[in-house]
Amino acid sequence: MKSSFVLLLIVIFATLSPATLQAEAVANRDGQTAIPAQLKPPTEDIAQLDELIDDAAEEKPYHIPMILNDSVENHLEYFKTRGRDVFQRWLDRSARYIPVMKDIFRGKNLPEDLVYVAMIESGFNPYAVSWAKAVGPWQFMPATGKLYGLKIDWWIDERKDPIKSTMAAAEHLKDLHNLFGSWPLALASYNAGAGKVQRAVLRTRSDDFWDLKASRYIRKETKNYVPKYMAATIIAKNPEAYGFTVTSIEPFKFDEVVVDQSTDLRLIARCANCTYEEIKELNPEIKRWVTPPQYTSYVLRIPTGRKDTFLANYAAIPAEQKIKWERHMVQNGETLAVLARKFNTTPEALRDINGIKKDRVIPGKHILIPLDLNSKTQDLSYLAINQGSKLQDILYRVRKGETLGVIARNHNVTVADIREWNKGLGKSVRAGQKIKLIVDTDQI
């Protein structure tokens, strides 16, 4: 009897392969379940979690292991229902940027599915701005952006550039993965900061993100960040299976030219036989209407197939249209008329160039002045093209010591504007309070 029982146990264990045992362990851990057969991607795709299949010739459906648990399923359900319209916009926009972004990650030997971090950060919007003034598709804060080589000043903000910011994000994510040895922890750190995640790892005595998620040591936003990323990745890699449409959009392609002096983008557009909006869309890092004056050779993007046309037209521009610019700080008592007389231009030109809607200018603010290089009245007729400024609603968190007047000056709006956008706002604001602002993203 005893020998029969032992024989039965041997048969049972013989039928359970190591892969089966490990798959069951993964599936049962922390309430995680195998993906239902009716969902895409299918169960066998997620089963790459065990990483037993290491065939380089076989394309992996996911380049970062995916887990389907209650939290990920909740985000899937949200994207399919209440968040459907927003997610569809993300998908539509992503088609333009994903090919070039994936090339960058592959070139750095990183999982190409990291591109979907930009989906949950900004919906692939180069002009996205958070309440904390994180900017661009990868939502870099100024200090982190500069740490990874992005230039940020009054003239340009490379956090908005889809290529330069992706290269910086790839390096940042590589550093985080090298620090933690885990993509879920690296992603959590991208959201919360490496220091906060390191402290949570020490306090929980676990290097498993899902243990951190079950603890009180990371914020709710960070707890949801990795599940949100996984849900967005699962849908984005198979959108039609979840009822979304795939839009055909031209990828982000361009020619490059070198501009040897600060040049107005509307003049660039005229030389390239395209629109100002096309130049701005290809060069979102440029915050003003000119290439930055501190660069003697600035690489500029123009629509594909226009390089020869641009070079020929640019060489033929008369000297009086090759304008240099000065960044001028408005002094007390200065008006547009005073500045126009001082710099031999017109109030209308200054108003159009700087996007000023009213006649008054605010002391302490900077405006661009076209310099008269030839003692002649500058030909500014080509500047009459609509500047196409991008206004965006942001939720701004009031900082300690700030008043409505300070906030208005810092964002180039009026106190009356702020009160109009925030009905019922009191006479003063307190630190930590959130208020709505409508800002020009080129001015951030």
Image (cartoon, rainbow, N blue to C red):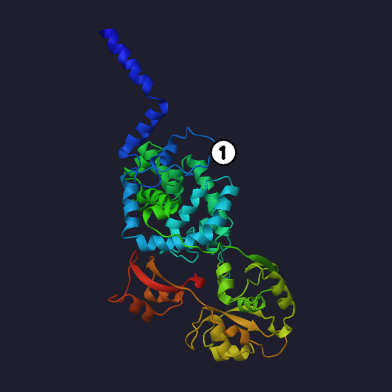
Residue positioned most to the left: 1
Q: Is residue 242 left or right of residue 181?
A: left
Residue 359 location, x and y as percent?
A: 49, 89
Q: In this figure, what is the number of numbered marks?
A: 1
The residue indicated by pointer 1 is 57
Residue 38 spot, x, y in % from top left: 34, 46
Q: Residue at x 33, y 66 (%)?
A: 433
Image point 52% across, 34% down: which residue? Answer: 54
Q: Residue at x 53, y 50 (%)?
A: 172
**Relative side of 35 to 332, left or right:** left
Residue 192 left/right relative to 379: left
Instruction: State the image coordinates of residue 434 (x, y, percent, origin top left).
Output: 34, 67
**Where, quadrant-wise, is the N terminus in this rendering?**
top left
Q: Nearer the viewer, residue 222 or 16?
A: 16
- In this view, 15 is above or below 264: above
Q: Is residue 336 above or below residue 290?
A: below
Identify which residue is drawn at 57% across, 48% down. Answer: 106
Residue 283 appears in view:
no
Badge 1: residue crowd in 10 Å (few <14, some 14–19, many ≥20): few
As helix, strand or loop, the secondary structure at mark 1 comes to loop
Rendering coords of residue 324 (x, y %): 67, 79
Query: What is the three-letter code of the residue carrying label 1?
Result: Ala
260 lies left or right of 348 = right
Inspect this view and state whether residue 100 appears.
yes
Corner quadrant of residue 153 = bottom right
Closer-to-camera residue (217/355): 355
